[in-house]
Amino acid sequence: MREGRGHLAPVIELTYESYVNADNSHTDRMSTKGRRSRADAAAETMARLVAVAQVAFAEEGYGAVSLDALAAGAGVTRGALHHHFGNKEGLFRAVVERIDAEIGAGLEALYATFDDRWTGLRGCYHAYLDAVLEPSRRRIGVRDMPAVMGMEGVDLLMSAGLAELV
């Protein structure tokens, strides 16, 4: 410890030798059981952000939602939001992809219940329209997506299977 520092508390000197020779036996006993990997933590953070954003975009619209509010709602920093999605548009895209995946899974399950392909196509087409126009999705898919994403949004939906229905 250093001396002669007046009223300041003593400072512990850390040298390379003291670091190398330190007793680190306590770290050998530390278990990694129950700890999440970085990938799991990142996936959880992203899922939380997308879920919060989906509700906010559906209720308030893209233009009225702030990044600060989204980050606070998900319990993360604005920096975490930027790290995972780049910007608000990137997060919006992830929300659109999530909605598309939800609708797609529902349509696949529905289509499997039909014996006749034509009847199945008609049933899925009507189910798709009902799903897109559902209040929790309408503002995002019908109003905001074309304005925010333009043709990229249409291309996203077409590549995800909408082209098969149309």
Image: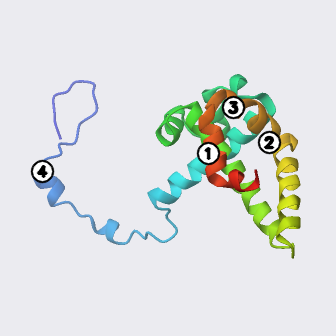
Q: Nearer the viewer, mark 4 or mark 2?
A: 2
Left or right: 84, with 64 as reference point: left
> Would you call the spot at circle 4 few (<14 residues within 10 Å), some (14-19), or many (20 or more)?
few
Pointer 2 residue:
137
**Badge 2 or badge 1: first in the primary sequence:** 2
Q: Earlier in the sequence, mark 1 or mark 3?
A: 3
Asked whether the beta carbons under mark 4 and mark 2 sit within 8 Å of each other, the answer is: no
Asked if residue 4 can be seen in this view, the reply is yes
Q: How far is disc 3 from disc 4 in space, using C-alphas?
A: 59 Å
Q: Is residue 49 visible?
A: no
Seen at 16% across and 36% down, the residue is: 2
Q: Nearer the viewer, mark 2 or mark 1?
A: 1
SS type, badge 2:
helix
First reached walking from the N terminus: tag 3 or tag 4: 4
**Label 1 to label 3: alpha-carbon separation:** 11 Å
Residue at image mark 4:
16
What's under tag 2, amino acid-wise? Arg
| Distance from Cα at disc 4 to Cα at disc 2 | 59 Å
Instruction: Name the amino acid, label 4.
Output: Tyr
Amino acid bearing label 1: Leu
The front one of 24 and 52 is 52
Cα–Cα gap, marks 4 and 1: 55 Å
Q: Which type of secondary structure does the marked residue at label 1 adopt?
A: helix
Residue drawn at 54 percent across, 37 percent down: 81
Q: Which residue is mark 3?
A: 146
Q: Earlier in the sequence, mark 4 or mark 2?
A: 4
Calculate the distance from the C-alpha at mark 3 to the C-alpha at mark 2. Answer: 13 Å
